[in-house]
Structure formats: structure tokens, C-alpha cells
Amino acid sequence: MSTSTCFSSLPTPSFTKTKPSPMCSMNKDPVRDWILSEGKASKITKVSPIGGGCINFANRYDTDAGSFFVKSNRSIGPSMFEAEALGLGAMYETGTIRVPKPYKVGPLPTGGSFIIMEFIEFGGSRGDQSVLGRKLAEMHKSGKSSKGYGFDVENTIGSTPQINTWSSDWIQFYREHRLGYQLQLALDQYSDRTIFEKGQRLVENIASLFENVVIEPCLLHGDLWSGNISSDKNGEPVILDPACYYGHNEAEFGMSWCAGFGGSFYNSYFEIIPKQPGFEKRRDLYMLYHYLNHYNLFGSGYRSSAMSIIDDYLAYFKA
């Protein structure tokens, strides 16, 4: 997710929400060095800036060996792109839904870092929703972890740190590293004791929502909203810009309020991974994480949505 809010009317997604800029002139350019060696190109024919956002620079490198997509950041070290590459690589290795293959992450000699990945030529739409639902379910079914819930590195949800410390207990993980972390941010940033205290009461009562539910650590994209969903020239769905971790598959729908998933998406998804009892009761719990994150990133415009979910659950729990 970029540091832009989710609106009802969104442009056709570009490969990344970044601001355009050509690579700066430098005596030693590790991006060109990689493309002309391990990238198996003998010449770079064109470098084109790609626009869309405010976190990173983005460029398309056309070569005689094909095209590459390059993101760079002038102030942040390689850890951010390393986390992105690990997530992309994990999804790519499932062999299910299409994602851009990551090739190389490294530091820039002038400071900052870069990531080189496969360039995917997008089609004119987000593709068939039923195919997206099926492919996403196949990824969840294929991508499993023996370590439990979490990920090998911390990453970000937007620009907010996302804590991925491994846990054997999903409910504990979601309490502490998702809802609890965001509630603490709201308290620290806005001194919002009301949402913090009510949110803590909610967190203490969520276990009952998971009775008779089988939970496995599935590989999640983690930030699946409309801006991170596209299709290739053949109409096959493509997902990008992940915030990956292993979690309950239903948590993938936490951005559904900003993803435009329709009935055909869910029908196809649940043909592969059947819907479990209480799904509808848990859906808002997973949306709450993202509403809280939007509140922490973008301000009070998202507070009422988060507060409404919390109040509804407290009334349901009579807590």
C-alpha cells in the first residue's frame, strides 16, 4: 500500500505507487552493472520513469534481453526492499497467482537502496474476479509455514511497521502484533485513550469468534486493495506491492472495503478453500486492522469507521 488513501474511484493501477525519476548519474551504478551482467543484457536501450506515488522512484529499463522494473529510494537502506523481495519471492514460488519476480536488492553508492524485478506489461483491466479468487485461494492453500504465524522479517503496511515475530497462536499474534500494535500507535500519536481502551476490551474478547474454526498459517499478500491488483496482457490477475506474512487466510480480506471484491471472487475462492463457520462475524475484525492503520497514517477521517467496528463488537460481546 502506498501512502495514499483509498478512494471509491481509483485509476488503473500502475506497477507501483511511486514517483518518477531517472537513476541519478553516478560513477558506479549497481543497477546497470547487474542488468549488464546477471541480467544477461548486452545493452540498455531506454530508461523510462514510471509515475504514481510518493515513496520511491520507479523506472523501466528496456534492454536487448527484455525489460526490467527498478524501484529506488534515496534515504532508506536495503531492508525495506529486502522485505518486499522476500514477500514477492515467497508468493512467486507457490506457482499460483502471478507476481513480479524479484531479481536483486542492494545499496546505492550515493545512499539509499534499489530493487530490480520482472517488468510486467499490464492489460487494460484488473482481470476476471473469479480467476483472481481462485488463484488467491490456490496461493493460500499452497503457501504454508512450519514456523507458525509471522514472517522471517518485519515489513511495512503502507509506511507503518508491521511486526511479524513468529507465534504458534494465531489469536495471540493478531491480538498483539496487529490490533494491539495499531491501538498503541493511536494512543501514542493522538493520545486517543477512548479508542485504545475500547480496543483493548475488544482484543480481550475475540477468542469466541474463532470457536470451531480450523486455522492454518497461510501465505498472505497482506495488503490486497485495488491499487495492488492488476492483470497482464492476457488478462491473468497480477498482485504486487505486498506486506506478506503467514496468517489466517480470512485476514487477506481485511482490505475488502477498498478492493472491490464481488460475488464471483468469493464464490471461486470458497470453492478452493471452503468458508468456515462465523466467517461473516470475523470479517470486520480483519478490516479493523486496516482501518486503524489508515487512522494512524492519514488521520481522523478513518477514526469513525474503526470506532464503529469496535463498538459493534463490544455490543455483541456485551463487554
Image (cartoon, rainbow, N blue to C red):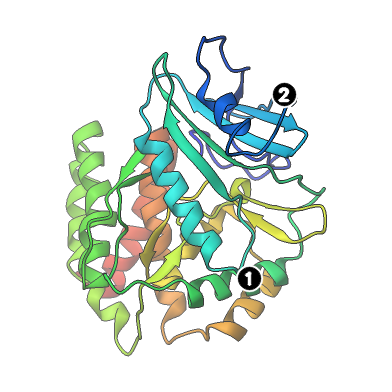
Question: Can you say whether 232 is above or below 2 in the image?
Answer: below
Camera-nearest residue between 197 and 274: 274
Q: Position of residue 149 (x, y in %)?
A: 29, 67
Which mark identifies residue 48? 2
Q: Could you tell me if the residues under marks 2 and 1 are in contact, i.e. CB atoms within 8 Å?
A: no
Disc 2 versus disc 1: distance between alpha carbons?
Answer: 31 Å
Is disc 1 placed on a helix, strand or loop? helix
The residue positioned 76% from the left and 65% from the top of the image is 128
Q: Quadrant of residue 174?
A: bottom left
Is disc 2 placed on a helix, strand or loop? strand
Other residues around mark 1 within 10 Å, as few (<14) / some (14–19) / many (≥20): many
Report the number of numbered marks: 2
Looking at the rendered structure, the kind of residue marked 1 is Lys
Q: Which residue is mark 1?
A: 135
In the image, which is nearer the foreground, mark 2 or mark 1? 2
Q: Position of residue 75 (x, y in %)?
A: 39, 20
Q: Position of residue 182 (x, y in %)?
A: 28, 47
Looking at the rendered structure, the kind of residue marked 2 is Ser
Question: Can you say whether 201 is above or below 66 in the image?
Answer: below
Other residues around mark 2 within 10 Å, as few (<14) / some (14–19) / many (≥20): some
